[in-house]
Image (cartoon, rainbow, N blue to C red):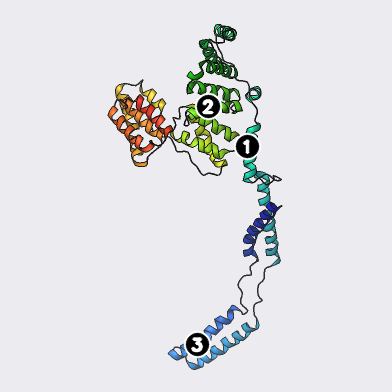
Amino acid sequence: MIFWLICLVLALAVAAIVVMPLLRPAPVTDKSPDVALYRGQLDELDRDVERGVLAPDEAERARAEVARRLLAANKTKQRPLVASHPRRAVSIVVVIAVLGFAFGVYKTLGVPGYGDLPIKARLAASDEIRAARPGQEALEAAAPDMPPVDAPEDYLTAIAQLRTIAPTRADDLQAWELLAYHEAELRNYGAAARAQARVIDLKGAATDIEDMRRLLDMMVTAAGGFVSPEAEQVIRRILDRDADNYAARYYLGALYNQTDRPDIAYRLWREIAENGDPEVFHVAAARDQIEDAAFRAGIEYTLPTLRGPSAADIDNAQDMTPEERQAMIGNMVAGLADRLANEGGTASDWARLITAYGVMGDTDAARAVWVEAREVFGTSAAAMQVLTQAAQSAGALE
């Protein structure tokens, strides 16, 4: 009820501002405007006589005529003007229109009847949603079917045999690795995830982050993009070993974004979106969703635009003649280097410049950019991961 009272008061206030000019009486005078005119003429006659422009007898006759007209004008005073009935009617129509428009817009864009939702209640509801979300098996069952892969018949037959053989060789690591890989190739991501989980069990302490990242990708894809409690456990294992891992940070952000905590998703994604390689799936996905998450969290945020040569540009340059390649890359690199020198940029932009110099064979320039980038991003482990990889591919670390 308080909400509706506030809305009504605000709508009436706006309506009052609109109709006040219509209800305000126009400025009026209680005398005819002719009175001032005739009085001015009498004064002018006296001045003309003093200057000798008009003879006294002529002035007397003129004064008598003006005085007669002045008396007549004094008898005809204007009645004060008041707001007329049509103006009051227009004001009433305006008030009704403003109120109707305001509540019509709210009915269309708002949520009439929705109860108050304080921040504590929202946080509690988010925690409940996260705690009560379905498990991996239920999410996989509810996920839409993947389109079939057009694969040769002999390949499908070989995979069917592998599905039969692998369970009979519980400790055969290679068999399970092959099964996980090929199930993913056939888009059987649920089966691929189970095979990859077996790979991790067999590797034990030798399991690396890439093994767990691969499992995480398979689990989320099999669940239709949702992060299950089981997938969250894999995320936590990865983050325990690498707190800046892009894949784990992206999926953890996705979990919070799916459970009404876009503010946490935004914080987890910003580093990835701004400094990660946009060619990597997790970075590209974070870039696609971060502005929406920021908007829902009430944060004003605009994702920095990527500029400079892309990885595709660099790859295409390999097929050109040396002269064409140097000309194309040189133009792009010059523009990117100038922008970074004057405006700065993200770690991804600096990595692109390092890579471009490497392709051009200018190792010294790549090394100089690498050194400068370390000074700018040295405190960010995630950014340094991107920059180090670029510097290594450009030969700037040797």
Amino acid type for the residue under numbered disc 2: Arg
Determine which of the numbered discs, if any, sits on residue 45 in the image: 3
Determine which of the numbered discs, if any, sits on residue 237 in the image: 2
Amino acid type for the residue under numbered disc 3: Leu
Q: Secondary structure at mark 3?
A: helix
Residue at image location 54% in from the left, 88% down from the top: 62
Marks 3 and 2: in contact by CB < 8 Å?
Answer: no
User: Disc 2 vs disc 1: which is toward the camera?
Assistant: 2
Q: Secondary structure at mark 1?
A: helix
Q: Secondary structure at mark 2?
A: helix
The numbered mark, 2 or 3, whose residue comes first in the sequence reads 3
Amino acid type for the residue under numbered disc 1: Asp
Marks 3 and 1: in contact by CB < 8 Å?
Answer: no
Give the CA separation, mark 2 to mark 3.
106 Å
The numbered mark, 2 or 1, whose residue comes first in the sequence reads 1
Q: Is residue 315 left or right of residue 197?
A: left
Whole-percent x and y of residue 7?
Answer: 67, 53
Whole-percent x and y of residue 112?
Answer: 70, 45
Residue at image location 56% in from the left, 81% down from the top: 36
Provide the residue designation for mark 1. Answer: 127
Q: Is residue 369 left or right of residue 215?
A: left
Q: Nearer the viewer, residue 158 or 34?
A: 158
Give the CA separation, mark 2 to mark 1.
21 Å
